[in-house]
Amino acid sequence: MMALRRRKVQMKITGKPVKKKKRKATIRREAALSSITHQLATAHALQAPLYECWERKDLFEPHAGVGTVVVTRKTPGNQVLMAAFQVDVFCLGVKDTHCMLLSENDYRFRLQQIETHQELSEAHPACAKKLVEGAQIYAESLGFSPHRDYEFAKRIFGDIKENQCHRSFTFGRDGKPMYMAGPNDNAQFRKKVMNTLTTRLGKNGFHYLMPLNEPECKDC
């Protein structure tokens, strides 16, 4: 009788880790399946019709230079594929980008979040593409690479034809690149940008604006 009880206790003790491992394995499988499902849904949404496009209204004004360009497609199931590009038209090109599949309500919420920092105006899809890709080409000519997710996010442009945009964009400011250090640019990043510009253009080949408490770059 005592031996039977000991076996039951052992089964309970040894059974717990097994169940825990099974739960973890199940969670991992479900997460992987969810990720694959989302990727497939996103890939399908890339073929959906264009929906809305937005850009920062005063993007090229001297006080601005950095803003968001949004391109969206809407699926038959009323989901919105949203690609948001943070674009520096004075120097760095595509600094950040996000591509996500959202409900209509979540999409509107995201737009509202963006508009807490900048005023958006509607953009022609061809002009949105021309603006984003043109800014990045300019940045690459200075030695700067786009955000790591740019190659995927720009797939949202699909078959949009740039020649349907009759606007022209002039990158840089006053004929030169203008690096305006952003609030999220740490000292190491700022130094890297300054060194890249100096190597490519020389000390007098560009403009820059640092935070008020940042000492002038003497080594650039």
Image: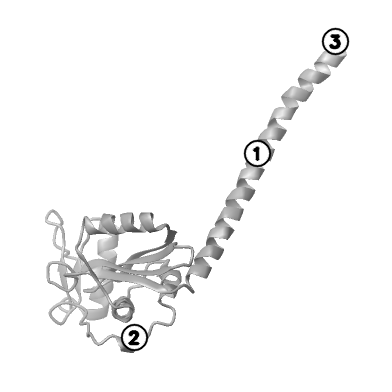
- The local crowd at label 1, few if under 14, some if 14 to 19, many if 20 or more residues have their Cα within 10 Å, is few
Task: Report how far apart the C-alphas of labels 2 and 1 lie in the structure.
Answer: 51 Å
Which of the marked residues, 1 or 3, is nearer the chain's N terminus? 3
Task: Report how far apart the C-alphas of labels 1 and 3 lie in the structure.
Answer: 32 Å
Residue at 13%, 72% in the rendered image = 61
Circle nearer the viewer, 1 or 3: 1
Circle nearer the viewer, 2 or 1: 2
Amino acid at the residue labelled 1:
Arg
Please identify the quarter of the rendering in which residue 14 is found: top right
The residue at which mark 2 appears reads as 162
Check the image and report above or below for 136 versus 40.
below
Q: Secondary structure at mark 3?
A: helix
Residue at 46%, 72% in the rendered image = 48
Dividing the image into 4 quarters, which one contains the C terminus? bottom left
The residue at which mark 1 appears reads as 23
Q: Are marks 1 and 3 in contact (CB under 8 Å)?
A: no
Check the image and report above or below for 4 versus 13.
above
Q: Secondary structure at mark 1?
A: helix
Residue 1 at x, y percent in the picture: 88, 10
Give the tally of numbered discs. 3
The residue at which mark 3 appears reads as 2
